[in-house]
Amino acid sequence: MSNTLSSAFAKFAVAFVAIAMMFSVVAPASAQSVEDMSLEELIALVTQLQSSLGDAGGDDMSGGSTASVCPYTWTRDLSMGSTGADVMALQQFLNSMPETQVAPAGSAGSPGMETSYYGPATGAAVANFQMMYRAEILTPLGLVNPTQYFGAGSRAQANALCTTPVDMGDDDMGDEDGMDDEDEDEDDTPGSASLGNDEGDIDGASRNSSDDSEIQEGALGAIFEFELDIEGDVEVDRLDLYLEVDDSTIASDDAEDYFTEAQLWVDGEEIASLDVDDWDDDDYTGNVSASTTDDEFRLRFSNLGLVYEDGDEPVFVLGLVGVNNIDSDDLDAQWNVALPVDGIRFIDGVGFTGNAPTPAIDDNFDFEVEDIAELDITKSSDSEDGRTIEVDEDSTSDEFPIMILEIEEEEGVDVVIDEMTMTASTTNSDVTSTIDEVLLVLDSEVIGSDSPNADGDLRFEDLDLEVDGDETVEVAVHVVFNGTEDYAEGDSAFITFNAVTEAEDENGNDEGDIDGASNAADFDSDTFTLRSEGLAISIDTITENKDSASFSGDFDTGTYVFTIDVEAFGEDFYIDEDASVVNYTVLVDGTPVDAASSSASLTVQNADDANTADWKISDTDTNVQFVFTVETADDVSGTTRVRIDSIDYADNDDGTEDQNVTATPASDWRSGSLILN
C-alpha cells in the first residue's frame, strides 16, 4: 500500500466512529453497512455526509453566528422605533438562531423578509437574546430581567458573536442608521498610496455637512466632517481637533461626563481612536472660538501615516461616543468642534514638514435627549373610605386595604420600580404600638413589606415592580394593626406615600431622572379609627332641598337630610333619639355659623327598644339607619351647606352618651350647597 493510500486510511480511521454514528441519521435503513464498504464507497459516503452537514447550517464551533450578515459590527444602541440598515442587520443576526427569531416564517421580519424597522417583534427577539447570554449582558448591568433594548451590553455580545467588523463605506459614516455598510476593496484602504519624491501640499480643507448634529446617549455620532484637497505627494502625519462646551447653563464641563471615546474615520474606515482619558485639557483656549475663554479639549491623533497623491480628496470624520447616562442637568450642553489653522501636520515627498489648512473650520452639536420614563403616582378613587374599623383587643388584625396606589407611566417608556418610601401616622406617638406591618400587594401577590419604626418610616425594597410604557398598575397598601391593648380605643391611623427611591427605565435612566419618582407629591390615605368595640358609621345618602321665597320679603330656607348606616361591633350600644347626639356644622360661604342658625331632628330606624335609652343597637343588627335632618333659619343668607362631624352614643343603657364616633373623611359627610336668600 502506498504512503498516500496509508495516509488516506489513517484520516478515515480517525473519523470512522463518528461516521458510523452519523450513518444511522443520514443513510437509508436499507443502506450498506459501513464495515462492508470499499475505500471508494467510504470516500463517497464521507463526501455525502460533509455535504449534508454543510447544508444543515447551524452555529460554528467557535460560537459565532452563521447569519448571512456576519461579519458585522453594530455601533449604536437600538430601541423601539429605530430604523436603518443596522436594524435589518440585527434582525438577520437574530433570525440565524431559532431561539431568537424575530417573526414566524412568511411574516415581516422572518428569515429572508427582514425590515429596517425596530418593532415589538424585534424587541422580543432581543429579549430572548439577552436571556440566552444573561451572564454576559444582564449580570454586569445589575439587571434581572431582559429589557428589549439593544444597548451596550447586548451590542458587545452580538459583535463578539458576529466576529469580524465590516468597513464603513467609502464616502462617509453613514446616514440615519449609523454607518455606511458598503464593503471596501482591500486596495481601497485610506491613505495607502506610496509617497513619491515630489513636493506636496494640502491646498485647503472644507467642512461637509456631518451626518449627526446630535449624539445619542451610549451611541456613536458622526458630528464633524471635512474634506482635504491634496496637491502633489503628501503624508498626513498628525491631526489636532478641539472641543469646547458652553458651560454657562450646565452643571459639568468635564468631558468624561459626556463621552467615552473619540474616533477618527477616513473615507469610511476607522483609523484611530482616543479614550476620553487621553483627551488633553491643558488650558487650551481660542482654537474653537476666539470670542470665548472656555477651556478646550485637544484631540490629537498622531502617527497616522496617511499617504495621498495629487488630486486626492480624502474625507475625515470625527465620531464621538456618548456615555450611557448623561446627568439631566447636562443634557442641554452645547458643544463646538474645530479644526484650527495649523491642525494638520503633513510631510511631502521631498521631506518638507508643514501644517495646514487655512482657514480654520468648525461646527457644533448637542445631545439627543432619549426618552425618559415619567411616572404619575396618585391615590385611586377605589381606595377605602375612612371609617371606624374593628380590630382585636389582644392580637393583630387581618390585612386591611387602607389605600390603592395608581402608578402610571406617561412617556411610553418601560420602567422597573425597586424601592419606594411611605410614612405611617397614628394618634399614638409611637407608631409601632398601633401598626405591626404594612404590605404592598399587586394582583393578590405581596411584592413588598416593612414594619414601621417609632416615627412611622417605611421603606419597601426589592420590589421588581414593572410598569410598561403608557400603562397603569394598581398597588394596594395593606396594614396589619396591633390589638387595642397596646393603644387607646378610638385611636386613628393613616398612610402617606412619599417617593420612589430606586427605579430604572428601559433606557437606563434612574429615579433622579424620572419625573414623578423621587419628586412625586406626597398624598395620604383616608384616616381610620381603630376599635375592638364600638359603632361603625357610613354615609348612605345626602339630599338638599331649597324652599324658595314665594313673595317679596319672604326668605329662602334649606333642608338637608343625611341617611346614615350604623353597625355595632364587639357588644351592644345605646342611643337616645335626640338630635343633640349628632354633632354637625352649618357652613355659609365656607365659614361655620352659630348653631342658632338651624334646627335639627333625628329618627332611628330598625333598632331595638331599650329600657332607659331610647334604642339599643345590637351587634347582630346590620340594617340600622339614622335619618338626620337639618333646616336653616330664615336669616341664613349665602352659599350654605351642612357637615356631620361625629355621633355620640353609650356603651351602657343609662341614657348618657359617653362614647363618640368621628365622621371621616370629612369630605364624605358634607352636603351639597344651596344659595339662600
Image (cartoon, helix red, strand yellow):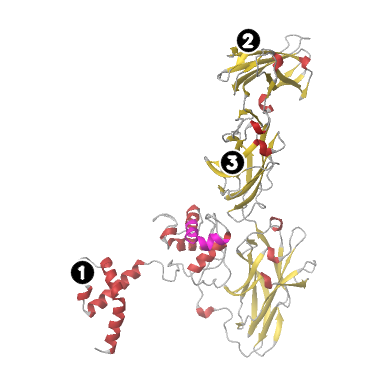
Q: Is residue 512 magenta?
A: no
Q: Residue at x 62, y 11 (%)?
A: 610
Q: Amino acid at mark 1?
A: Ala
N-term mark: 3 or 1: 1
Residue 668 rendering spot, x and y as whole percentages: 66, 26
Q: Which of the two residues, 544 or 74, is positioned nearer the viewer here?
A: 544
Query: Label 1: how many residues lie within 10 Å, few (<14), some (14-19) or many (20+)?
Result: few
The residue that disc 3 covers is 439
Number of residues whose C-alpha sits closer than 10 Å to that of mark 2, classed few (under 14), some (14–19) or many (20 or more): few
Q: Earlier in the sequence, mark 1 or mark 2?
A: 1
Provide the residue span drawn in magenta: 127-140
Q: Earlier in the sequence, mark 2 or mark 3?
A: 3
Query: Residue 406 sits in which quadrant?
Result: top right
Q: Which residue is mark 1?
A: 31
Residue type for callout 2: Asn
- 128 within the magenta span: yes
Marks 2 and 3: CB-CB under 8 Å? no
Which residue lies under the disc numbered 2? Answer: 611
Provide the major secondary structure of the magenta segment: helix
Task: Name the spot of residue 13 as percent of width and height, x first.
Answer: 29, 79
The residue sitting at 28% across, 66% down in the picture is 25
Left or right of 164 in this view: 562: right
Q: Is residue 109 left or right of residue 471?
A: left
